[in-house]
Amino acid sequence: MATHSATVVLATAAITLAAYGLLGYVLLRRPPAEVAPAVRQMLAALPTLIAVVNAAALACLLAGWKAVRTGRIPAHRRYMLAAVGLISAFLVLYVTRVALGGIKAFPGPPEVRRYVYLPALAVHVALSIVTVPPVVFNVLTGLTRPAVEVPATAHPRVGRIAVSLWSISLALGILVYLMLNVFY
């Protein structure tokens, strides 16, 4: 079991570093100066689609947490894998939007920007970065161990931390969307 755990930790580190490297590479590039009108239309629709995907991921995450708390392990697995699939779709959509220049400045009052929007955005981004390793670890553990062995691993302890941080990050991401696109 110790060898398996070490393998999962190493795989988690490799996947996390690869994801951070790819995201950093794409996000630090300068977006194109001009995009086609069809791309502009797509970029305009992406924030809403991203928020819907985030809300669905949050719903799956919380349903998965509830399922495991009530002993419904197969449902827990389905919900958590759906949440991971949705967050993967989110990443593709978000990176596409940013890479093509589809970012938007906060249009609301400066006080709301300073005391509500920026703190919410900062916590959202920080948690989205910090949450990657425990989520990857738990997915790998859940997929590579027989279900009866998972409770004896770090999966339950790491999962409690991951679901809390990931839920807060997703909820704040939705709040940021609402502040950028609905409230102001």
Image (cartoon, rainbow, N blue to C red):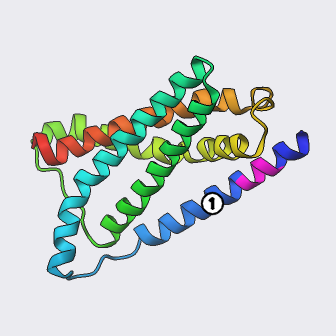
Where is residue 75 drawn, in percent x and y? 56, 31
Question: Residue 57, image x and y in percent?
Answer: 42, 41
> Disc 1 marks which amino acid?
Leu
Q: Estimate how packed mark 1 is, as few (under 14), some (14 to 19) or many (20 or more) residues with alpha carbons within 10 Å.
A: some
Residues 132 and 85: in front is 85
Instruction: Name which residue lies at 16% across and 37% down.
Output: 112
Question: Is 37 left, or right, of 151 in this rendering?
Answer: left
Residue 123 visible in the snapshot = no
Q: Quadrant of residue 20?
A: bottom right
Residue found at x 14% / y 37%: 111
Residue at 20% of width from left, 60% of height from top?
A: 45
Quadrant location of the C terminus? top left
Q: Pick out the residue farthest to the top.
A: 70
In the figure, 139 relative to 28: above or below? above
Secondary structure under tag 1 reads: helix
Judge whether residue 34 can be spotted in this image: yes
Q: How many marks?
A: 1
**Quadrant the N terminus occupies:** top right
Let me know if residue 12 is in the magenta part: no
The main secondary structure of the magenta stretch is: helix
Residue 117: x %, y % from top left: 24, 40
Q: Which residues are magenta?
A: 7-11
Q: Is residue 129 left or right of residue 4?
A: left
- Which residue has dot 1 on it? 17
Observer-nearest residue: 91 or 73?
A: 73
Image quarter of residue 76: top right
The image shows residue 21, relative to residue 66, as above or below, that is below
- Residue 109 relative to residue 97: left or right: left
